[in-house]
Image (cartoon, rainbow, N blue to C red):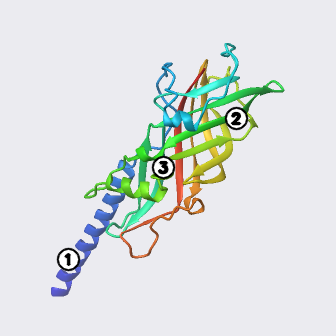
Amino acid sequence: MRFALAWKVLAASVLLAVAATVGAITYFNHARPASLGLASFTPRPTASASPDDPLSLVCRRPAVPGASTGGGVEGLWVIQPGSVAGYRAREQFAELTSPHEAVARTDSVRGWVLIGESGGSPRIETGCIVVDVRTLRSVDEIPGFNTSDRDSASRDFLGAGQHPYVVFQPYPVGLQLSAANTGVQHAKLSGDLEIRGTKKTEQFTLDILVSGAQVAAAGSTVVPVNEFGIEVPQEAGGFVRVDPRITLEVSLVLLKA
């Protein structure tokens, strides 16, 4: 009888542990912020940024003669308010059995892309996109934790005091895009990505939606941050371990200048 009772107690404990684990995994999957996607609103033209705006100084617009009034995609496209950038990082807390995904975002995004034409097809001539990493804020949730406490550590990892901006400058490349296509189109965009003063070639995979003089673009790239001189916690047995392969994601809204 005692053995049977002990077995029942043990079985109940195992079931509770399994239920707690499943519940934690279900919560994390449910609470995890979705990846950045194409903007669902219509952007409106805004006043030009001040010449003294630090982000605009990092990404100075090129001198383009006259505004393009054609119906194609050729011309200068300027990033608008409503654009968002951020990162996703897989982390494992010592106190939790389930892995977690840290997510931080900011709307401090500026820049532009200059589209030309080659052989009847659009072509990126040059561009510059800048993000102020000092303004990144965590948007994920963990029961019993204040995820905003992570933000100051992230700024330290990024060296935001000396290197407050992440900059992406795409390489010239032809685009298989059509202004007449009202559906989602796709592109891969390689360029120089500068993080913490280190510049390397990276490639973003993007979904693009063209609607007249408006463009929405959303996508991501996975970056091994240790190659940029960023050291994230990886010690076994520490409070938290972070996968150094971190996803950078963007959702951009652009208007033709």
Instruction: Kindly give the residue lying farthest to the top in the view shown.
Output: 69
Q: Is residue 52 above or below residue 158?
A: above
Left or right position of 177 against 57:
right
Position in image of residue 173 (x %, y %):
75, 37
> Eyeballing the image, is 256 above or below 93?
above
> Observer-nearest residue: 125 or 177?
125
User: Residue 43, how many percent across, how many down?
Assistant: 49, 22
- Work out whether residue 184 can be spotted: no
Residue at image position (24%, 73%) is 13
- Name which residue type carries label 2: Thr
Looking at the picture, tell me which residue is in the foreground, 186 or 64: 64
- Quarter that holds the N terminus: bottom left
Give the CA separation, mark 1 to mark 2: 68 Å
Residue behind mark 1: 9
Q: Badge 2 is on which residue?
A: 126
Residue pushed farthest right? 119
Q: Secondary structure at mark 1?
A: helix
Q: Is residue 249 above or below residue 3?
A: above
* Disc on the earlier residue, 3 or 2: 3
- Tell me which amino acid carries mark 1: Val
Residue lying at 41% horizontally and 62% vertically, measured from the top left: 99
Disc 1 versus disc 3: nearer the observer: 3
Q: Earlier in the sequence, mark 1 or mark 2?
A: 1
Picture quadrant of residue 228: bottom right
Q: Looking at the image, how many numbered discs can be counted on the residues?
A: 3
The quarter of the picture where residue 112 lies is: top right
Q: Quadrant of the C terminus?
A: top right
Q: Crowding near pointer 2: few (<14 within 10 Å), some, many (20+)?
A: some
Residue placed under numbered mark 3 in the picture: 87
Mark 3 is on which residue type? Answer: Tyr
Mark 1, residues whose alpha carbon is within 10 Å: few (<14), some, or many (≥20)? few
Q: Which badge, 1 or 3, comes first in the chain's sequence?
A: 1
